[in-house]
Image (cartoon, helix red, strand yellow):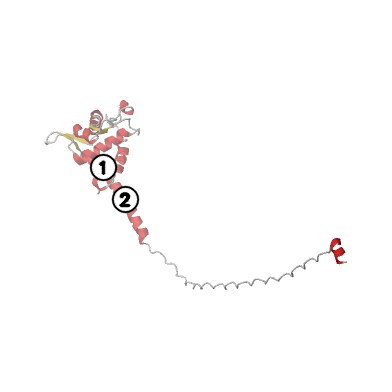
Amino acid sequence: MASVYDVNQGELVEKAAEELKKVAEIKPPEWSSFVKTGTHKERTPISKDWWYFRAASVLRIVYRLGPIGVSKLRTKYGGKKNRGVKPGKFYKSSGSILRKILQQLEKSGFLKNELKSKRKGRLITEKGKSLLDKIATQMFKGVKVKKTAEQAVKKEPQKKEEAKPKEKKEAPKEKPKAEAKEKPKEEKKPEAKKAEKVPTSHELAKKK
């Protein structure tokens, strides 16, 4: 049987929140829709079911660190506040929210108040422990089944494709060098005969 330490904590809280929705004692108060979870937060929670997620997260922390009280849980859920130009400063989360969640979990039988030991606070009961362990076991089995399926797929022998005979690549034939084209000899054009001078009338008169 798997425990809380063997699975993803984020997924564990989500599935535990779904189970806590079925419990009648755990209900968000009327003011939960418009309240912040601490002075370091700028806005209210986005999720409508944030009360159940916080209750599941508190149950997981008490499982791991119990006995634990409101003061240490306030430090656990605190954070740094953005103060503009001033350096950020750590502030604790709301004590009223955590106190009411612890009271609801105690009424539902998931937690109990420890007063005998040196560390006073809430401890997880067998009922609360079995709830988280059952969810963790289901998650662990689901992960194990996925891993085995993936391993089986990897181990399947892949059919080797028949190696086709490699075709010998013929060397590219060298292209014959283009023969130099002989330029046609230019034929010498016959020189134009010089035009004979026609004797003028003056020259003819002198010859006579």
Instruction: Inspect this view and state whether residue 153 appears.
Output: yes
Residue under the image location 23 percent in, 39 percent down: 61
SS for dot 1: helix
Q: Quadrant of residue 70?
A: top left
Give residue 89's position: percent from left, percent from top.
Answer: 24, 32
CA gap between label 1 and label 2 equals: 17 Å
Please name the amino acid that badge 2 sits on.
Answer: Val
Q: Residue furthest top?
A: 31
Is 158 situated left or right of 16 in this image?
A: right
The disc, 1 or 2, on the residue closer to the chain's N-terminal end is 1
Q: Which of 162 and 87 lies nearest the eye of the viewer?
A: 87
- Count of marks placed on residues: 2
Q: Circle 1: is it few (<14), some (14-19), or many (20+) Cα within 10 Å?
A: many
Query: Vertical placement of 166 versus 96: above or below?
Result: below
Q: Amino acid at mark 1?
A: Leu
Q: Where is mark 2, residue-wise?
A: 143
Report the residue marked by disc 1: 132
Q: Position of residue 59 (x, y in %)?
A: 24, 37
The residue that appears at 19% across and 40% down in the rendered structure is: 65
Label 2: which secondary element = helix
Is residue 103 placed above or below 188 in the rendered structure? above
Q: Position of residue 196 (x, y in %)?
A: 80, 66
| Residue plotted at (34% across, 58% down) | 151
